[in-house]
Image (cartoon, rainbow, N blue to C red):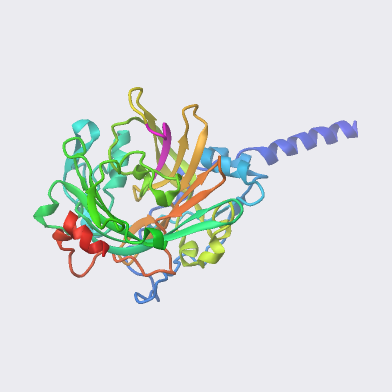
Amino acid sequence: MKNYIFFILLTISNIVVNAETLFKNNDIGDRIPISSPVENYNPDSNEYINPFIQDEIQFEINALNYENYLTHLTEGQIQMFQSYPETFFMNIYPSRRSCAVPREVLDLSKSGNANMIADGEGVDGIIGSIPFPDASEPLHHVWNHILRYRGVDIIGGAPYYVVNPDGTMTQGAGEAIAKNCWNPFVKDSHCEGLQGMLMQKVTHPPRLADASLLVIESLNALKSPRKAWVYDPGTRRVRRAPNIAYDYLGSASQGLSTADSFDGFNGAKDRYNWSNVGTELKFMPYNVYDFYNADRKNVLTNFHVNQKFMRYELVKVNIVRADVKSDKRHIYPHRVMYFDVDSHGMISEEVYDGKKEIMNYRELPLMNFYDEPACLAVHSATYNFDTKRYLLNNVRSSEIDKIIWRADKPHDIQLFTPNGLKRYAK
């Protein structure tokens, strides 16, 4: 009889231990944006003080207990636990809804103020606003991400890394200048009808040095598709590059990321059918100041970034699915994208092949650059489950000069021309 009672108690205990832990909306608390520099912030330093340095880890999710949190994990995260059970874990911290944008952006975004045009390929609305503050359609979330506040006249550099499972890696770096046209601070008539203009060049490795790119992106991709030019240092010539779109694979990414994956998602949307999955609570990389301030030597490990520097919070996300149309093609046939409700930025993505088996998992950890303010990713980490390699690109870090989000002198519009690209590359 005693053994029977013990068996019942043990069974009940196992059920309790293995029961899934569920969270509700009130577990993420209220939004408290940080819209100005925190105490002791030094604008001359490349570091950003962590305003939540006193926060303690609430609990750790790892390969032994992740099944207790399945509702609040993405398929990509689950695959990470299964693929790297000995090294991948997630430290969960209190939710700090700190993301902020300039007051001018909020003032323009108090009500619905935009319309999608050209079958979703374009937007017409109040320049500088959050175009769809009450988003209801899947492409509303995509456009909110694309047109979120990202500065004005931008200057900066970023390293990138392709890391192999044996720990060897390829390193590179680049510089860029950009002019974002969708914001309250640009009155230049040359910006009319444009999302913005970007010019970048590779500075390392030497064999690719000065390979440069110019992209001009319109607000209506159907009416005016992306315009792109490249400068080849070997021939010293500039040529049009109509293929830098969709699933074009640049040499720097070594096949791990497509052109339309830069900055989460960008460019034309016409190859996919888009659908809303819903709004859910997920554990997402957020307020990653410790990672930003860490030494690069310590954050790059064989299979993924060093998780001890990462911070995850319970975050409300809008989930959107993209499935390639039957008469179109894309090397990423199925994609699931997660957009932060507060900042509208993409924070995670899963990519599936034609058999709907997961190929890649991407994280874009968010951090509030409170001196601007702008809530943006500190990098994009793309993990490929077939090769066990990963790409870390668009890296922002205390080891490089801070990004200038709003240059004192606006960029000369003539820079963003083929002739300007040639001068910039040299």
Figure quadrant of residue 273: top left
In-image side of 240 versus 322 (left or right) = left
What residue occupies the far left of the structure in this picture?
189
Lateral position of residue 117 relative to residue 364, left or right = left
Q: In which quarter of the image is residue 17?
A: top right
Whether residue 48 appears in magenta in the rendering, the answer is no
Quadrant showing the C terminus:
bottom left
272 over 257 or under it: above or below = above
Note whether residue 170 is visible: yes
Q: Position of residue 128 (x, y in %)?
A: 20, 52
Between 72 and 372, the residue placed more toward the observer is: 372
Residue 262 point in image, percent of width and height: 36, 48
Q: Is residue 184 visible?
A: no
The quadrant of the picture occupied by the N terminus is top right
Q: How many marks?
A: 0
State the residue in front, 365 or 211: 211
For the stretch drawn in magenta, the main secondary structure is strand
Which residue is situated farthest in the top direction here?
Answer: 326
Q: Residue at x 36, y 56 (%)?
A: 376
> Is 281 drawn above or below residue 106 in the view shown?
above
Q: Residue at x 57, y 38 (%)?
A: 70
Q: In this view, does 8 lie to the left or right of 361?
A: right
Q: What stretch is highlighted in magenta?
A: 330-339
Q: Position of residue 232 (x, y in %)?
A: 29, 55
Residue at x-position 49% and y-position 29%: 356
Residue that appears at 63% across and 52% down: 87
Q: Where is residue 159 in the image (x, y as percent from the top left)?
A: 42, 61
